[in-house]
Image: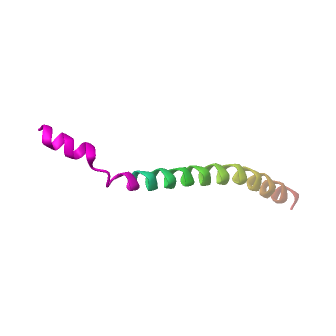
């Protein structure tokens, strides 16, 4: 059991995957925030145009 624990502790192969997952997560969160803020402005403009027609 100790040998397995030491091997797992020294294993660094999964570090890159975690980094890429964190970067992808941050990009997704940024996209959601941008679409949310722009979407409300587009909806307000669309409602304005629709009521004027």
Give percent across and percent down for residue 19: 44, 52
Indicate how the structure is coloured in the image: rainbow
Furthest toward the bottom, the residue is 53
Residue 11 falls inside the magenta stretch: yes
Q: Residue 9: which quarter of the image? A: top left
Residue depicted at 65% across the width and 54% down the height: 35
Residue depicted at 27% across the width and 46% down the height: 10
Residue 45 falls inside the magenta stretch: no
Give percent across and percent down for residue 23: 51, 53
Furthest toward the left, the residue is 1
Q: In the shown orientation, is residue 39 left or right of residue 16?
A: right
Residue depicted at 81% across the width and 56% down the height: 45
Q: Main secondary structure of the magenta part?
A: helix
**Closer-to-camera residue (16/46):** 16
The stretch of residues the image draws in magenta is 1-17
**Closer-to-camera residue (51/6):** 6
**Closer-to-camera residue (25/51):** 25
Give percent across and percent down for residue 14: 33, 53
Query: Vertical placement of 5 versus 52: above or below?
Result: above
Residue depicted at 88% across the width and 58% down the height: 52
**Closer-to-camera residue (39/1):** 1
Q: In the shown orientation, is residue 3 left or right of residue 28?
A: left
Image quadrant occupied by the N terminus = top left
């Amino acid at each position: 059991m100790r040998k397995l624990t030491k091997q797992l502790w020294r294993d660094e192969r999964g570090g890159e995957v975690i980094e890429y997952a964190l970067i992808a997560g941050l990009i997704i969160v940024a996209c959601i925030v941008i679409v949310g803020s722009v979407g409300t402005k587009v909806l307000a403009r669309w409602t304005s145009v629709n009521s004027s027609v």
